[in-house]
Amino acid sequence: MRKFLLITCCLLSFSLSAQNKYNALSFNVGLSQQNLLNKFNSPITYSGFGIGGSLGYINTDYDKVHHEVRLSFSVSNLKPVYIDPASYNPNVYVSSINAELKYRYAQKVYNFSNGIKLYAGGNAMIDFGLRNNSVMGNGSTDINLSLLSLGISGGMYYKINQRMNLLWFIDIPIISYIYCTHYLGGVFVDEKIEFKLASFGSYQKLASDLCYEYYLKNGNAFRATYAFSVINNSNNQKLTIGNHTLFLGFLFNLSKPRKS
């Protein structure tokens, strides 16, 4: 745990050197699609749609450094993906809630002649997932929690013109401090809350977001984002979660006074 605190302090200290060229609050709402496979509860994949949202803060100088703090969530009602559609039971579903708090720091490392800029840096994430299965008994509810994950980030920035940008990032945790519900054959067997340190080999996550930004004269901007993430946890339960979310949002400029 001491290593986690040390690395986190180092990661956050990078932000002190950031050039405060553009500061903004971001608000996003959207449609989320999730796929779930929890082999300790069911051999069947569950899938469904829901709603999502995010709230964040951006502090960036796109020519040098970009860092962002964001809280996002999704709520979905998942149905089993049956091999035989005739066997579909409408009373079988999984209610799923997911939340993520992320801090990302990335610095420009290369500038192509066509204006595309490449970034590299790090991230710190907290993940929470809660799922309730409508037909399970003792194993009806399970939780996965990454109390803290530290990893690497990479991305690119492309300025289309004075008003429009494309921004794309990928975040991958390398080491995580995690908890997930203890099951054995779908039966809850341990009520103790125990966290463990997991490497990329046993707890894997890939998170990506592609943003299109259209700026107004006062520095505010419209933003459309496609976010994708997949979690594969093989520690206490075989759990795979995939999320696709399409966000529509707005950036409120804080770096200079707005024009009337």
Image: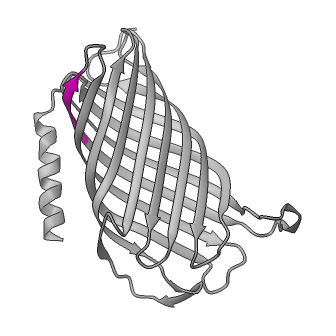
Decide which of 44, 142 is in the foreground and name it: 44
What x and y, as percent, mark residue 90? 82, 65
Decide which of 24, 62 is in the foreground and name it: 62
Q: In which quarter of the image is residue 251?
A: top left
Q: In this view, does 248 lie to the left or right of 159?
A: right
Task: From this view, report whether residue 56 is shown above or below residue 165.
Answer: below
Q: Quadrant of residue 78?
A: bottom right
| Residue 107 falls within the magenta-colored stretch | yes
Q: In this view, does 94 lie to the left or right of 234?
A: right
Seen at 13% across and 54% down, the residue is 9
Task: From this view, report whether residue 94 is shown above or below residue 180.
Answer: above
Q: Is residue 199 left or right of residue 168?
A: left
Seen at 39% across and 61% down, the residue is 204
Image color mode: one colour
Q: Main secondary structure of the magenta part?
A: strand
Decide which of 224, 186 is in the foreground and name it: 186
What x and y, as percent, mark residue 56? 37, 39
| Residue 137 falls within the magenta-colored stretch | no
What x and y, as percent, mark residue 80? 72, 64
- Residue extending furthest bottom? 189
Magenta-drawn segment: 105-111
State which quarter of the image contains the N terminus: bottom left
- Residue extending furthest right? 86
Task: From this view, report whether residue 159 is shown above or below residue 128.
Answer: above
Q: Number of labelled discs?
A: 0
Q: Quadrant of residue 156?
A: top left
Seen at 37% across and 12% down, the residue is 218
State which quarter of the image contains the C terminus: top left
What x and y, as percent, mark residue 140? 62, 78
Seen at 29% across and 39% down, the residue is 154
